[in-house]
């Protein structure tokens, strides 16, 4: 048996623990054998806690580290592909889909500007910053506000782009400011502990009530996350506090900020390992609103489909059937879906 480790991963509201062993073998990505590394060190999972049922494992795409740190963390899969000539560029691009008609995707070796509004010219690039934990996909955050609350007045803080983290993470100090504001606004329904905030009411009851989160990166580009997008339907029981139906996706992420998949649903992200930089571009709207002509055609189709048929029941009465698909398809209240992003308050624009 190989050397064993235990790895803890904070996924934003869910702590994942992986027990792994070290092996060396041929490792491939995808169904074909085009992207394979021979004699590559990897870590099979033999026991796990809280890994989602749709997740098979973790693909590490961290930037290259110093030689000393690399010995502890293992080699870069993407960099090894480039060195073996399998790809031309050590680069990874992620599309986190919020669309029913479009699947998530990852591209290794290049990126696809057709995912970005305005194409490659509109992608904003940020140089990476390094801290005492080594290189991460992080840059400098030079301003952050929650509604009218200024979260910090220092020159900058670090912010990490992390596709393995679902929520928006704030430093401990700044999360405390936000949680205080949330509990003061509705002390009977909002509860915050040291890590997260929960609401007793349904998320739908809070639409339009939460202010937006605004973050400026590298003193150049400002990103706005609408308050409605920060709400997640999630039923949870808290000891001595009762039942909660909604979670605010602003969480305590320690000593730095994090922008997780909640943010990446709106931005195509590119991780350039060769040049220690990352790119963000607003994702194309793959499901734009219907035109007036399309709405009229859909209404006509619905009117045609809704003609009722009457089946005689055993007692001579008429049984009316208007839904050929079997009735209501409402979602469970404990799903991970986010509310309609278009329902925002006047101060909650999601534009860059």
Image (cartoon, rainbow, N blue to C red):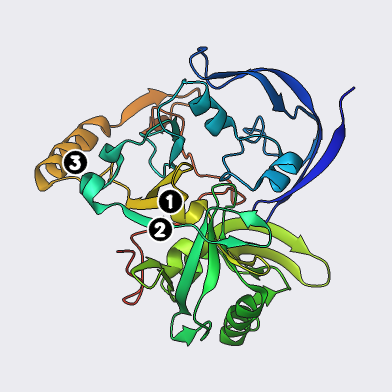
Label 3 CA crowd tier, 10 Å (few <14, some 14–19, many 20+): few
* Residue at x 72%, y 64% (from the top left corner): 243
Marked residue nearer the N-terminal end (2 or 3): 2
State the CA–CA distance, disc 2 to disc 3: 46 Å
- Asked which secondary structure carries label 2, the reply is strand
Give the residue number, with chain letter if any, for mark 1. Answer: 278
Q: Quarter of the image for the N terminus: give it.
A: top right
State the CA–CA distance, disc 2 to disc 1: 5 Å
Marked residue nearer the N-terminal end (1 or 3): 1
Give the residue number, with chain letter if any, for mark 2. Answer: 126
Give the residue number, with chain letter if any, for mark 3. Answer: 299
The quarter of the displayed image where residue 310 is located: top left
* Residue at x 30%, y 64% (from the top left corner): 351
Label 1 CA crowd tier, 10 Å (few <14, some 14–19, many 20+): many
Q: Quarter of the image for the C terminus: give it.
A: bottom left
Side of 5 relative to 65 (left or right):
right
Above or below residue 155? Residue 164 is above
Quick check: can you spot residue 173?
yes
Q: Nearer the viewer, residue 15 or 290?
A: 15
- Asked which secondary structure carries label 3, the reply is helix
Give the farthest residue toward the right.
1
Marked residue nearer the N-terminal end (2 or 1): 2
- Asked which secondary structure carries label 1, the reply is strand
């Amino acid at each position: 048996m190989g050397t064993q480790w235990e790895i803890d991963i904070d996924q934003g509201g869910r702590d994942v623990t992986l027990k792994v062993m070290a092996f060396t073998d041929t490792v491939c990505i995808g169904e074909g054998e085009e992207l394979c590394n021979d004699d590559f060190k990897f870590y099979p999972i033999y026991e796990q806690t809280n890994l989602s049922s749709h997740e098979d494992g973790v693909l590490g795409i961290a930037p290259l580290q110093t030689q000393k740190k690399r010995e502890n963390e293992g080699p870069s899969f993407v960099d090894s592909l480039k060195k073996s000539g399998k790809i031309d560029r050590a680069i990874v691009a992620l599309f986190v889909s919020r669309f029913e008609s479009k699947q998530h995707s990852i591209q290794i070796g290049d990126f696809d500007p057709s995912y970005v509004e305005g194409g490659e010219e509109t992608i904003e690039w940020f140089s990476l910053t390094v801290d005492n934990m080594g290189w991460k996909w992080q840059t400098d955050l030079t301003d952050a506000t929650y509604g009218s609350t200024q979260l910090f007045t220092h020159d900058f803080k670090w912010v990490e782009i992390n596709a393995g983290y679902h929520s928006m993470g704030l430093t401990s100090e700044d999360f405390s400011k936000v949680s205080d504001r949330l509990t003061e606004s509705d002390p009977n329904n909002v509860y915050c502990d040291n890590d997260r905030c929960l609401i007793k009411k349904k998320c739908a009851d809070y639409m339009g009530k939460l202010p937006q989160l605004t973050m400026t990166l590298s003193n150049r580009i400002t990103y706005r996350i609408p308050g409605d997008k920060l709400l997640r339907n999630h039923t949870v029981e808290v000891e001595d506090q009762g039942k909660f139906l909604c979670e605010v996706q602003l969480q305590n992420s320690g000593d730095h900020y994090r922008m997780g998949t909640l943010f990446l649903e709106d931005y195509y992200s590119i991780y350039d390992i060769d040049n220690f930089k990352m790119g963000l571009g607003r994702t194309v709207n793959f499901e734009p609103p219907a035109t007036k002509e399309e709405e009229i055609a859909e209404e006509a189709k619905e009117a045609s489909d809704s003609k009722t048929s009457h089946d005689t029941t055993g007692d001579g009465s008429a049984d009316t059937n208007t839904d050929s698909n079997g009735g209501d398809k409402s979602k469970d209240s404990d799903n991970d879906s986010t509310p309609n992003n278009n329902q925002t308050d006047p101060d909650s624009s999601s534009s860059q």
